Image: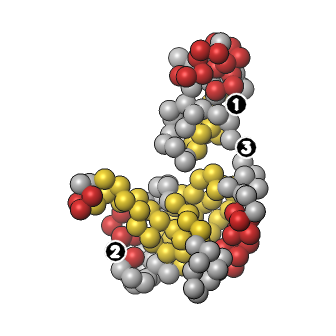
Amino acid sequence: MAEYCRDCSILYLGPDSAKYAGGLCKPGETTEMLCEGCGGFVRVDHRGEIVRIGMTIRAIVAGTGFEGREQYIRRFAKAGMPVILRREPDNKLDGNAIAVDMLVKRWYALFKEVPVQIGYIKKQRAASMSKRIDSGGNILSARVESMHMERNHPRVSLIIETDW
């Protein structure tokens, strides 16, 4: 069976086919697919719509050794897993702060996924990213690139895709 992005589904199969496009990833995430109509790999969202990527950013998560975060990282973090970046403009230590959360299944939530903070984007990177986010830029996806499990401070590296 051929795979089509939403635009090609409408073009080649008609307007009714748009309701069948997508479903390749969760809302808020993007994935790469081979579109037979476009003739190559394209990045699509959960609706099958092509997402234009502006910049890919690599960032390191700071503060992984505080508040018991290392236990969640050691237990649940895996290379490739999505993370959630959350702006914290009211953070008392840094007005440019961007928190990093991962979704973890917890018993007290009846094993539903709940966000658990694993740290913050390092200060210098957060300063430039927060300006873009505050002026309307979007984070399209963020995921764990790699981890190094040192004693009390696991090092977590991220790959972040943006529209700026």
Q: Which of marks 2 and 1 is nearer the N terminus?
A: 1
Mark-to-mark CA distance, 2 and 3: 36 Å
Query: In the picture provided, is 142 more to the left or to the right than 55?
Result: left
Q: Nearer the viewer, mark 2 or mark 3?
A: 3
Looking at the rendered structure, the kind of residue marked 2 is Gln
The image shows residue 159 at horizontal and vertical percentages of 60, 60
Q: Name the residue under label 1.
A: 40
Q: Residue at x 67, y 55 (%)?
A: 138
Query: In the picture provided, is 2 more to the left or to the right than 69?
Result: right
* On-image quarter of the C terminus: bottom right
Mark-to-mark CA distance, 2 and 1: 41 Å
- Mark 2 touches mark 1? (CB < 8 Å): no
- Of all residues, the one furthest to the front in this rendering is 90
Q: Mark 3 points at which residue?
A: 52
The image shows residue 131 at horizontal and vertical percentages of 74, 69
Looking at the rendered structure, the kind of residue marked 3 is Arg
Tell me which corner region of the image, top left, top right, bottom left or bottom right, holds residue 34: top right
Could you tell me which secondary element the residue under label 3 belongs to? Answer: loop
